[in-house]
Image (cartoon, rainbow, N blue to C red):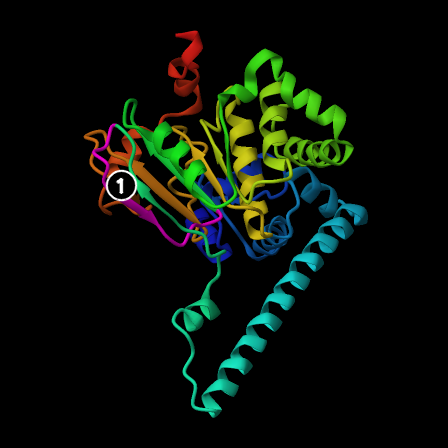
């Protein structure tokens, strides 16, 4: 089958298959015209790679497992076992809730408002409601069903930074991770890592995994990871997550954040204008796009499908990391 058919059957993007090929993990054949073709053995190999990626392995770790490294596979299976154990406990909690509702029904008691909805919830019950700040006119704004990954996007002057800060002020137990994380050579993150060995261990673990995805270690990346791994807030709002990160690092970071989202990481609001952070072809069901329109009409959720309302407005706000590196300047540098 051709690359499109192979990607569809495997449940991955064409871009992912080509990345596996670039890393030498698959080697599809070619037609006389030079097009890639995937035979049965290629599909078995690619399916193994997809399974290992689903378990949370980085590309380098996948390559090691395919070469017979049992340690990397054991670590991934241990993490997956913990995630499954958490899911089992959540199912047990829901079963207990269902039994309680049925016991109430047997006594003629109907469930309270919202109890049935909670049985089906996949995400934490987090919501926010507030008056929109300037440049809006104080309109009432509500966000329900907060997802693990939430993107805030808008053109220059659209108010996205003010909206991000209002989320951090309004959401329960939320914090704002601004561009000050990069100040003074990331001095704050260095001090935190020096004082907190557990935090340093988590950041080092993330860096190792990201390096396996092709990320380039930098002070900006360490500062970002320090903020992401710090204990405390239940929700984190990050200003311009791509700041000072190269394209390969941005792509590796998103693979890392999606992996965290699947294992119950805290919800994140990511302010961005990078097409490598917000790849419209890779948005999953655990992710939401919030657009701040250029005309200062109220922010709105946008579905990641061509033809959906405001989809083109989102697409025009995004730029490649190379372009973002040229035009994105921190306020104090202007």
Q: How many marks?
A: 1
In the image, the segment drawn in magenta is 135-148
Q: Does the magenta segment cover residue 83? A: no
Classify residue 249 as left or right of residue 131.
right
Instruction: Name the foreground residue: 189 vs 285.
Output: 189
Percent across and percent down for residue 82 are: 70, 57
Quarter of the image for the C terminus: give it: top left
Could you tell me which residue is drawn at 71 percent across and 50 percent down? Answer: 76
Q: Quadrant of residue 57?
A: top right
| Residue that mark 1 sits on | 311
Instruction: Name the foreground residue: 119 vs 31.
Output: 119
Percent across and percent down for residue 80 are: 68, 56
Could you tell me which residue is drawn at 46 percent across and 67 percent down? Answer: 118
Q: Does the magenta segment cover residue 137? A: yes
Most common secondary structure along the magenta stretch: loop
The residue at the far top in this view is 334
């Amino acid at each position: 089958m051709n690359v499109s058919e192979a990607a569809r059957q495997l449940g991955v993007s064409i871009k992912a298959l080509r990345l596996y090929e670039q890393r030498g993990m698959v080697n599809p054949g070619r037609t006389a015209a030079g097009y890639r073709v995937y035979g049965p053995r290629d599909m078995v190999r690619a399916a193994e790679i997809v399974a290992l990626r689903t378990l949370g392995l980085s590309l380098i770790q996948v390559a090691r497992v395919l070469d017979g490294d049992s340690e990397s596979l054991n670590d991934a299976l241990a993490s997956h076992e913990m995630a499954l154990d958490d899911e089992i406990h959540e199912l047990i909690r829901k079963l207990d809730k269902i039994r309680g509702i049925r016991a109430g029904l047997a006594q003629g008691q109907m469930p309270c408002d919202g109890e049935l909805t909670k049985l089906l919830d996949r995400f934490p019950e987090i919501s926010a409601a507030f008056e929109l700040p300037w440049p809006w006119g104080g309109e009432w704004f509500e966000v329900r069903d907060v997802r693990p990954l939430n993107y805030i996007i808008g053109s220059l002057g659209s108010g996205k930074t003010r909206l991000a800060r209002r989320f951090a002020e309004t959401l329960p137990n939320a914090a704002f991770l601004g561009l000050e994380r990069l100040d003074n050579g990331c001095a704050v993150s260095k001090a935190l890592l020096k004082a907190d060995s557990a935090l340093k261990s988590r950041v080092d673990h993330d860096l190792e995994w990201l390096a396996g995805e092709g990320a380039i270690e930098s002070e900006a990346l360490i500062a970002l990871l320090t903020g992401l791994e710090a204990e405390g807030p239940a929700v984190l709002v990050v200003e311009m997550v791509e700041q000072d990160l190269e394209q390969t690092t941005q792509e590796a970071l998103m693979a890392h954040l999606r992996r965290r989202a699947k294992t119950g990481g805290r919800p994140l609001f990511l302010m961005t204008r990078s097409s490598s952070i917000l790849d419209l072809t890779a948005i999953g069901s655990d992710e939401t796009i919030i657009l701040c329109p250029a005309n200062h009409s109220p922010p709105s959720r946008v579905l990641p499908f061509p033809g959906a309302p405001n989809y083109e407005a989102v697409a025009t706000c995004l730029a490649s990391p190379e372009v973002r590196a040229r035009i994105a300047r921190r306020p104090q540098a202007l």
